[in-house]
Amino acid sequence: MPSAAEVIHCTKSDRACPLLSLPLFAQVPADRWRRFIELATVREYQRGNILFYQGNPALGLYFICSGRVKVRKEGRFGHDQIVRIAEAPDLLGDRAFFSQSPYAATGEVMEQSTICFLEAKSFWDILGQENATLRHLVRRFAQELGHAEELMHCLAACTVRARAAAELLRSDDVEKKDEVLLTESRIELAQILGTTPEAVSRALAEFSDKGLIAVKGRKVRILDEEQLRRAACPHRRPPRSLA
């Protein structure tokens, strides 16, 4: 069992906090930002720690300062699906919080992460009257709705092979143009793609046999990007690089 999250003191100065790069805080006055720093609880989490469970009430908002969190939907017969991976800096738990409904999925930490939690009353006292903040949240909800619609269409219209090809292209490391590091396990990758680990392994093996990729552990080298793009689901496929 993963250890409980540890409460820590933020060591970054006000202006160095990674959360300031979020559009949510772009026009927040300095005095309200300082109140956020004072009232938010900062914790250090390890892989496997649970932030919130599906079905539990949302009592506040989570802000990811560093690390990653997977949001997984618990399905029938124990089959989960990862519906989102949130990477720092990001906001988490907002849909349930603002709709005043239980969490529709479970938030599980994927790697060592630093995460702030702000209680509901504190959020409304600090940020609830800021028009710029509320406008940003409206835009965010619209973008998330569009992403959810694309994901649903992808799951219905595209094969596992096509979804796997698109995920490889999306994971392409900008530092090493042709190399992908699969930071998720085969089980997690299957949950992202809405399939089984066996189906993921078959898709990767097929791409390898055809010379599109080379696989070594969690490292995948893309050998034929053009053919991989042709095989990829168009709903998840990233745009071509202009470089």
Image: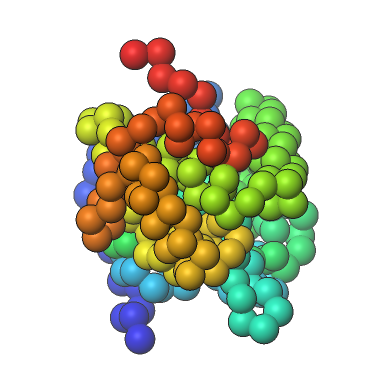
Residue lying at the far bottom of the rendered structure: 1
Using the image, determine if residue 234 lies above or below residue 157. above
Residue 182, image x, y percentages: 34, 53
Residue 46, image x, y percentages: 31, 69
Q: Is residue 6 left or right of residue 206?
A: left
Total marks placed:
0
Residue 99, image x, y percentages: 77, 54
Using the image, determine if residue 42 lies above or below residue 49. above
Residue 55, image x, y percentages: 69, 74
Residue, x 40% and y 13% (percent of image)?
242
Residue, x 53% and y 38% (percent of image)?
231
Q: Quadrant of the C terminus?
A: top left
Residue, x 43% and y 53% (percent of image)?
206
Q: In front: 133, or 3?
A: 3
Q: In front: 203, or 172?
A: 203
Q: Is residue 138 visible?
A: yes
Q: Quadrant of the N terminus?
A: bottom left
Q: Is residue 129 visible?
A: no
Residue, x 73% and y 46% (percent of image)?
157
Q: In front: 100, or 154?
A: 154
Using the image, determine if residue 217 lies above or below residue 18. below
Residue lying at the far top of the rendered structure: 242
Residue lying at the far front of the rendered structure: 210
- Scheme of image coloration: rainbow
Please identify the quarter of the rendering in which residue 237 is found: top right
